[in-house]
Amino acid sequence: MDQQSQLALLLGSDLAPFETLISHLMSSSNDQRSHAELLFNLCKQSDPDSLCLKLGHLLQSCNNPETRAMAAILLRKLLTRDDSYIWPRLNINTQSSLKSVLLSQIQVQATKALSKKLCDTVSELASSILPENGWPELLPFMFQCVSSDVPRLQESAFLIFAQLSQYIGDVLTPFIKDLHAVFLRCLSESSNPDVKIAALNALINFIQCLTTSSDRDRFQDLLPAMMRTLTEALNNGNEATAQEALELLIELAETEPRFLRRQLVDVVGSMLQIAEAESLEEGTRHLAIEFVITLAEARERAPGMMRKLPQFISRLFAILMRMLLDIEDEPAWHGAESEDEDAGETSNYSIGQECLDRLAISLGGNTILPVASEQLPVYLAAPEWQKHHAALIALAQIAEGCAKVMLKNLEQVVSMVLNSFHDPHPRVRWAAINAIGQLSTDLGPDLQNQYHHRVLPALAAAMDDFQNPRVQAHAASAVLNFSENCTPEILAPYLDGVVSKLLVLLQNGKQMVQEGALTALASVADSSQEHFQKYYDAVMPYLKAILVNATDKSNRMLRAKSMECISLVGMAVGKEKFRDDAKQVMEVLMSLQGSQMETDDPTISYMLQAWARLCKCLGQDFLPYMSVVMPPLLQSAQLKPDVTITSADSDNEIDDSDDESMETITLGDKRIGIKTSVLEEKATACNMLCCYADELKEGFFPWIDQVAPTLVPLLKFYFHEEVRKAAVSAMPELLRSAKLAVEKGMAQGRNETYVKQLTDYIVPALVEALHKEPDTEICANMLDALNECLQISGPLLDESQVRSIVDEIKQAITASSSRKRERAERAKGEDFDAEESELIREENEQEEEVFDQVGEILGTLIKTFKVSFLPFFDELSSYLTPMWGKDKTAEERRIAICIFDDVAEQCREAALKYYDMYLPFVLEACNDENPDVRQAAVYGLGVCAEFGGSIFKSLVGEALSRLNVVIRDPNALQPENVMAYDNAVSALGKICLFHRDSIDAAQIVPAWLNCLPIKGDLIEAKVVHEQLCSMVERSDGEVLGPNNQYLPKIVAVFAEVLCGKDLATEQTASRMVNLLRQLQQTLPPATLASTWSSLQPQQQLALQSILSS
């Protein structure tokens, strides 16, 4: 049968063929389903009216509930406003018929699932046509349903209200009074729990769609009734309903926490009562805790609010501590045969752990630590091992959030943990070691610097606990945490003991102990660097033996960790010591690379990293191996994320708890599940590509054509931050590799055109990604990478590319300013306190990063394009001038001044037109309280003195008095001020050089000479000392002074410069030596002797050897 006839049959008067088509759409057979989809789409294109009416007909008359549900779903899809939106194509009769079918079907007795699908369809259509008044009957109908006595109708209407609030809340706002009355009546009077939950859902969605707090506050009086929905459900033993209510209230706490503020004490009190009620299901109690934690975390919307309730925080802490007691002493834990470290832990235990961590991070140490120091000692003093264990676990969990305050009480914290190293119960000892590991991370490096003499011996002793292999293994892991934040000097004295114990553990029969020892050795080698050389010969044979022999599946992780360890040891001891073993190791890796591995084999990711470390260690000697390394690395970098998408409210939700490796995020009405192991491998591979390009420079050239198209699209890979960061860092490395290869003639015959093509591919992509980047830190990384790209191949850009960069800079400045404004708003909240202001300070520091990078990029553009960049600079000036303001941070002022300095220096005469506007700012900033701002300003004065000609002349007097203040400051030579001082001296020198006729030279030139030599800013030092050299060469009278009286000072300056490090260029130094030789020959012996005697003895010796050589 041809398609036309098939369509005629499907859309004809007999419903049966159409009903069959719909059932085929639900078929499990792919062929049947795709054939049905094809026919359905044909109907949609050729006769959408008949198709919609048929679906409406099925809704009314079909007996099969699944088919009716499918018809409702298909209608919803057809009426969704997307690319295939067909409503406007339907004739007016079809439209009104559909609207009345939908409303009549809502009134017909149907299953709950079908009712919900009908409501979804109504909401979807209404959200498109209600704003243009395309369905005037709908709202009256809904109000009528809500006011009826039929629970199912009430529930349906509330479902639609809830969805409309999400989609088109402004259409409902005019009915705020009527809705208030409806919600009040249903929540207070209805006896049907389903209706109440539906009303609660609609109310919470409606509150969220209201844009003003005064509108939201009109619903404050409903809060007691909202809470009663929850308590009544609990009193009636209806915990499923109670859990639904809790989930809705959690949503409210997250989005509108301040709505709860006036009744906070009652609401939080009720929640804690639920959490404390042992008769309730765990799931219910956990949700009540989640509610309170969510409020504590609502930092952006209600900063500081929960800190005002100390009595509740103490109660919540106690609840969480009791949850940590829910742990069994499982034999599997002691056996240590397998990884299950959490043997005996319950869901109570793991939620208690997670919530302590979140509570501490959200409320901070000043709030949490006093509560902890009250409750933890009581637990530690109790007889039960579970309580000791709980106290140590809690301490480790709160360390990150309380780090700053814990550092002030480090002695107490460390003693508390180390005392438990001797506890009789091995699980308590394990928890103590675990706490030390966590504290080493969260309180490092202070903990390491102050307590290494107590911690390392304690961990070493724990490694001798052969009765309890799990404790041994954990002690080795804690050595890793400890050494990661440690300097080689601190570790060195302990290495003999620690390395010998780790070698003993490497030969242990338990695999987890061996793995722990390997990771610890790797970390110790990495942290002790060349101090590790003396252990190399003892350690390496063991490591190679594991690499070669651990071949069966159960040992995969062991072999993977041996690769990590070997490559880190190799990097620590260096190429010479490692070279012979490196060859053998790479042979093994190459044969592994060629073998078939299962997708979940950890070897792959460890091998990627080991190869990259071997490359860092061997440098260009690694090039022959690249052809083996790169193909699988590119394959890993090109992995597609393993994504499953379901609708957010679908019944077959992805179950988060079962699969550790799945992470789910909800975007709008879609739930997206992503396999994290794939993402991690991809991120590792991208990082490695970046390492190779960085290490091999031009040697990486042959791979650019494959790597660039792999990494450039990943600049917008929003599933994983690490992938984006790696792609961002690689961009300048690829350009640098290409440029160097072309310059050194290693580019396989390609020339500058290739670098231009690569630049045209990379720079616009980076600019576009920057435009869409949601994360402030990555924005700063992108600006930094863009700046490096410009330094490498900026001159190759055309005007439109520069324009897009400038537009992006405007956007970055605007976005950053508005983020700062939001923070300032947050600071006005009722509960704002010291802790919040500390957090805001940290966020603003991250913002400075963005401004820093903006300044750097503008500097690079100005240096690259000089005068031709000025039209863009003029456009940007309205964005930059506000940065000079007194209300702006020192960092912003410094950046604004640096940008002007660059323009003045690079554009010389063309920049004179800006002096009137900018110089007053620069002069004022010379005496700013911030030394970095002062440095930028006095440097700018030097630039203007050099290039400003007659415009600068009129300002010489003010410039001198400003510089004088900087130079004569009694603290001028303190480390934080010395850069500003050196630049002021340099600027003074330029005024002496270019404006001698406008100053009292007989006073000012000797004053300048007196400041020499300068030693802080090595760039300015070279300029200033060269200037002095030239002045002496041309016998400048004011420098030499009457009767050459300043010669001893000049000789002393030369001596200090020649004996110093990097204070003059080689050329200047040899000119100084020639001048000194001339002086030796021309000066009268008496003058020479007195000049010499004014030098320090070691300078005399140094000069004699320099002059005689």
Image (spheres, grey):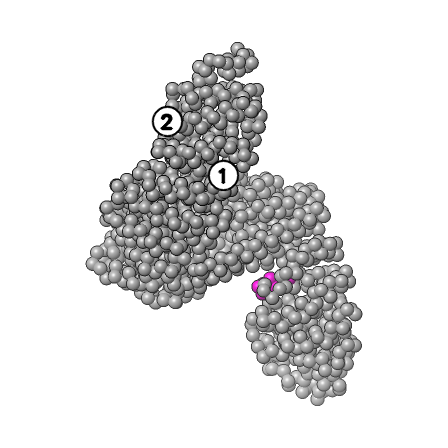
Residue drawn at point x = 43 percent, y = 53 percent: 258
Say which element carries label 2: loop
- Left or right relative to 276: residue 677: right
Q: Quadrant of residue 347?
A: top left
Q: Is residue 409 magenta?
A: no
Alpha carbon separation for disc pair 1 and 2? 25 Å
Sort mark 1 into few (<14), some (14-19) or many (20+) by Cα contacts within 10 Å: some
Q: Nearer the viewer, residue 495 or 730?
A: 730
What is the x, y in percent for residue 251?
41, 45
Residue 646 in view (yes/no): no
Q: Is residue 88 above or below residue 1093?
A: above
Q: 766 or 5, which lies in front?
A: 5
Tell me which residue sits at (64%, 46%) in the image. 763
Q: Look at mark 1 in the image and give the residue it sits on.
A: 167
What secondary structure predominates along the stretch shown in magenta?
helix
Task: Name the residue rendered at 55%, 43% in the picture.
Answer: 716
Q: Is residue 775 above or below residue 634?
A: below
Look at the image and say whether residue 895 sits in the magenta stretch.
Answer: yes
Residue behind mark 2: 110
Q: Which residues are magenta?
A: 889-896
Query: Tags 1 and 2 in contact by the CB under 8 Å rule?
Result: no
Q: Residue at x 21, y 56 (%)?
A: 384
Q: Residue 314, image x and y in percent?
A: 31, 59
Amino acid type at mark 2 = Ala
The percent coordinates of residue 787 (x first, y second) are: 62, 53
Please tell me in which quadrant of the rendered image residue 987 appears: bottom right
Image quadrant for the C terminus? bottom right
